[in-house]
Amino acid sequence: MSVAGSTESVELFTHPTCSGCQEALAALSELSRSGQVSLEVCSLGTASGRIRAEALGVTTVPTVRRGDDLVVLLGKDDLAALIDELGAPAGGARGKGRGGPGS
């Protein structure tokens, strides 16, 4: 449930050699700096990061955890859709753009 003025917490799973991870980190960091999300970053380049990822079922990076949902970012379109959703006001475009072609 969204509360006016609250920010959504997201967790980004990355790896140091993943180029898409750097793009996702930059975009989500910008939303975090602007107060639109609370961002936690978990690197699979560390033992603790691998343990955390395994516990949550993360097998691909970059992946974003939103509540109980894992969103695998397979490309720029997935990242753009996620950024649009996270940057939208509560009840706005949330959920839009992730239903496949033409959405």
Image (cartoon, rainbow, N blue to C red):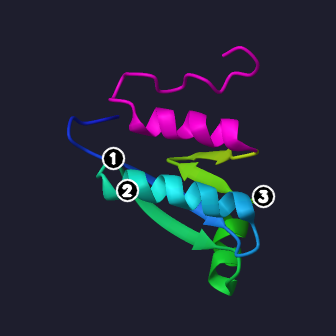
* Mark drawn on residue 36: 1
Q: Position of residue 15 (x, y in %)?
A: 71, 71
User: Which amino acid does the dot numbered 1 rest on?
Assistant: Gln
Q: In 3D space, how far apart are the residues under numbered discs 2 and 1 (Cα atoms)?
A: 6 Å
- N-terminal-most mark, 1 or 3: 1
Label 1 Cα neighbours within 10 Å, binned few <14 / some 14-19 / many ≥20: many
Foreground: disc 3 or disc 2? 2
Q: Are marks 1 and 3 in contact (CB under 8 Å)?
A: no
Q: What residue span does the magenta drawing correspond to?
A: 75-103
- N-terminal-most mark, 3 or 2: 2
Instruction: Name the residue that disc number 2 marks.
Output: 32
Q: Is residue 88 depicted above or below 42 in this figure?
A: above
Front position in the image: 44 or 1 = 44
Foreground: disc 1 or disc 3? 1
Residue 93 among magenta residues: yes
Q: Position of residue 33 (x, y in %)?
A: 33, 58
